[in-house]
Structures are given as structure tokens and as C-alpha cells.
Amino acid sequence: MRQVVLDTETTGLELRLGHRVIEVGCVELVNRRRTSRTLHHYLQPDRDIDPGAQEVHGISIDMLRDKPRFGEIVEDFLGFISGAELIIHNAEFDVGFLNAELRRTGRQPATVTEVCTVVDTLALARRLHPGQRNSLDALCKRYSIDNSGREYHGALLDAHLLADVYLAMTGGQATLSLDRNSPEAGGQAQESRQIDRAGLELRVIHATDDELLEHEQQLQLIDKASKGKTLWRSCP
């Protein structure tokens, strides 16, 4: 199973105002394991960057003057994501901007979903943690993922963090609560994913005779202290 964790940075929030993608970062996962493959590009947007957006990601127009335009890296981008399952936080935003960039190139495919499927980790987080904050920073804190180096938003940095968050969210039980109606469970069973252990060789270390003897002596001490009421002695 090949997955690509993706994030973008943009000149602003409004597609209808002609805002553009200025950074794209991707991290590859294969069978839920991070590989060494990443994709990262800064892009020339041919327009100004909103001050509010620059405060978030720290990217200025001067930093992008010598960078390629999206059309120059589109083949590299599509080659990296094609056939994968895209993992994106607030996918509607990123996919909308990427589709707009693809349409500007005038080439096919014209949408991201023509070449891959998309999983929205924001929607997943809202199902797992209803009524709670589910920003990337909040999820990093919830799953004990170190994001101390995130002074600014950055596409590749955020893709690496999101990869850790996604693996933590989908790695099995997310709470020790046994009550499916507890607030942590959100009134529903926790999502889990079966881990494929095919081909896994585990080393089994057996107790030595001395260790078994010490164990039996300890059990006898506990049995004596409880005046013969230990369950392992009374059960068939």
C-alpha cells in the first residue's frame, strides 16, 4: 500500500481571488512505513502574497522570484502522487488549490482525484475526537508528537508531522477507556487497523530453569501471605 502525505502553502485563502500554490511538500509511506522519498518545491506564483498568509508560513515573494512555476514541475508532481492514497489535513483546501493549478496548465488530468484517492485527516480526527480542537498542532500535542521546530507552517515540515499524526491516529486504540459512550470514544467504537505480520520472525526467549525456580518460590511466598487464597492455586 503506497500513501503520500501532502501539504501546500499558498498566497492566500481564497481561490476565487486568484490565490496560488507557492509550496508543495510530499512524504511517501509504503505499507505504513516512512520511506526516504519526498517531494518538495517552492513555486513562483506570479502575484503578491497576502500579509496574513506570509505571517503564517514566512514565505516572501522575494524568496520565490527564481523558483519554477507549477507548470514546470507538474510532471514531477503527478509522477510522485499517481496511484497513491493522498493523506491531507483539510483536504478540500489543498485539493482545490492543486486542481486550480492543474487546470491552468491546460493538460490532463485536470484534477488530483483522477490519479489518486484522498483521505482527509481533519475529517478523520473529527470522528475520533468530536468537539475537540483538531488542528495539526492540537493533534501533535494529543499524540505526543514533537512539533517544537514548527515556528512557521511549511509544506514539507507539516507533511512529516502529519505522517506521524496519521500513523498514530490509525494505529489502533486511541484511548484506554472501555466505555464506548465515554467522551474520549465519542459515543462510538474506536477505529483500528489490522497490522500485517506476514513474514515477521519473532525471537522467543524462554525462561531458564533458575528463573522458573525463582518464579515458583515467589508464587509460594504470595500464596503463603494470602493464607492460601491465591486464585491460581484454587482454579482447575
Image (cartoon, rainbow, N blue to C red):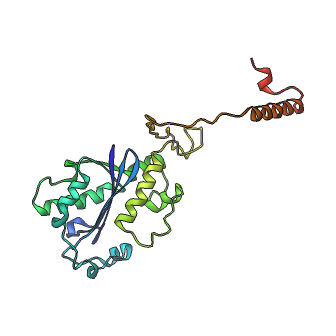
Q: Residue 160: x percent and y percent?
A: 40, 60
- Report the side of 113 relative to 33 (left or right): left
- At horizontal 79% and vertical 31% (from top left) the residue drawn is 213
Q: Residue 91: x percent and y percent?
A: 32, 55
- Which image quarter holds the C terminus? top right
- At horizontal 18% and vertical 70% (from top left) the residue drawn is 69
Q: Nearer the viewer, residue 232 or 142?
A: 232
**Residue 9: quadrant of the picture:** bottom left
**Residue 220: quadrant of the picture:** top right
- At horizontal 48% and vertical 65% (from top left) the residue drawn is 147
Question: Is 36 situated above or below 2?
Answer: below
Residue lying furthest front in this view? 209
Residue lying furthest left in this view? 106
Q: Residue 191: x percent and y percent?
A: 46, 40
- Which image quarter holds the N terminus? top left
Q: Residue 98: x percent and y percent?
A: 23, 60
**Residue 5: quadrant of the picture:** bottom left
Question: Is 227 situated above or below 191?
Answer: above
Total numbered labels: 0
Q: Nearer the viewer, residue 29 or 65?
A: 29
Q: Nearer the viewer, residue 220 or 207?
A: 207
Residue lying furthest bottom in this view? 62
- At horizontal 15% and vertical 65% (from top left) the residue drawn is 71
- Report the side of 147 relative to 51 (left or right): right
- Report the side of 43 relative to 108 (left or right): right
